[in-house]
Amino acid sequence: AQSVAQPEDQVNVAEGNPLTVKCTYSVSGNPYLFWYVQYPNRGLQFLLKYITGDNLVKGSYGFEAEFNKSQTSFHLKKPSALVSDSALYFCAVRPKAAGNKLTFGGGTRVLVKP
Amino acid sequence: DSGVTQTPKHLITATGQRVTLRCSPRSGDLSVYWYQQSLDQGLQFLIQYYNGEERAKGNILERFSAQQFPDLHSELNLSSLELGDSALYFCASSPGTSGGGYNEQFFGPGTRLTVL
């Protein structure tokens, strides 16, 4: 069975500082990996995904993520955080061979302080 | 705006009752997914439909059922409601193939269900 771990319930960062949200996964075979963001009282919004190829993936709003196969990680990063980045972030995994079931991590709340 | 619509936004009902949540996918998307988000369980996949057929099942209770209609909208039916069913229910859609693969899902704004 596949699983996703986001080890930090909350990440606090000062505006302008780098932001990292951690994600590790467990899945058979090679996965597709996704990051979504959820703002208060809103649905999830897609940020970026890893399919294949370059391990560094660039997405919306200046976010990027690095796929590390040996560490089974897909950490989300932003070089300079904004107060408006404060939200709930979800990592998700889908095995390539197993159809469409997307498994989400527990979410990490990001608080960017001015 | 993701293009996925859900109605109603809020629903308050009593234990034992039955409710229906409605979802309209993005134009052209054939797959519809239902998720439940609660504080204790996180975001849980319930069920997926592709072009009218059930494609994948997750942690969906027997009291819950769903269907996708010929116009591709979907409904999630929740019956014999319990207090623990109170949650945010999301619908998502994605384009194309039944395998889905690497397509991202587009989420609706959700329906907040409160069972009293």
Image (cartoon, rainbow, N blue to C red):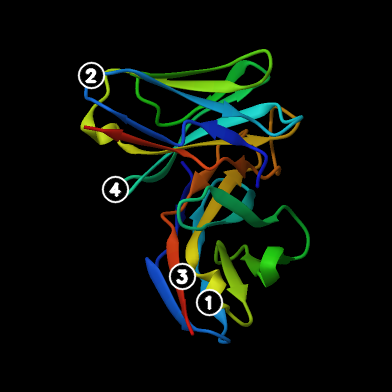
Residue type at mark 1? Val
Residue B94 vertical position relative to residue B15 in the rendered view, above or below: below
Q: Which mark is residue A83?
A: 1
Residue B79 appears at what percent x and percent y? 32, 18
Do pointers 1 and 3 mark residues of a single chain? Answer: yes
Residue B21 vertical position relative to residue A46 in the rendered view, above or below: above
Q: Which residue was labeled with disc 4?
A: B40
Do pointers 4 and 3 mark residues of a single chain? Answer: no
Q: Which residue was labeled with disc 3?
A: A110
Residue B58 occupies quadrant: top left
Residue B38 appears at what percent x and percent y? 35, 44
Label 1, secondary structure: give it: helix
Q: Earlier in the sequence, mark 2 or mark 4?
A: 2
Q: Residue at x 55, y 70 (%)?
A: A85
Do pointers 2 and 4 mark residues of a single chain? Answer: yes
B58 sits to left or right of A69: left
Q: Which residue was labeled with disc 2?
A: B16
Kindly report which numbered mark, 1 or 3, lies closer to the viewer in this rendering.
1
Do pointers 2 and 1 mark residues of a single chain? Answer: no
Residue B28 appears at what percent x and percent y? 76, 29
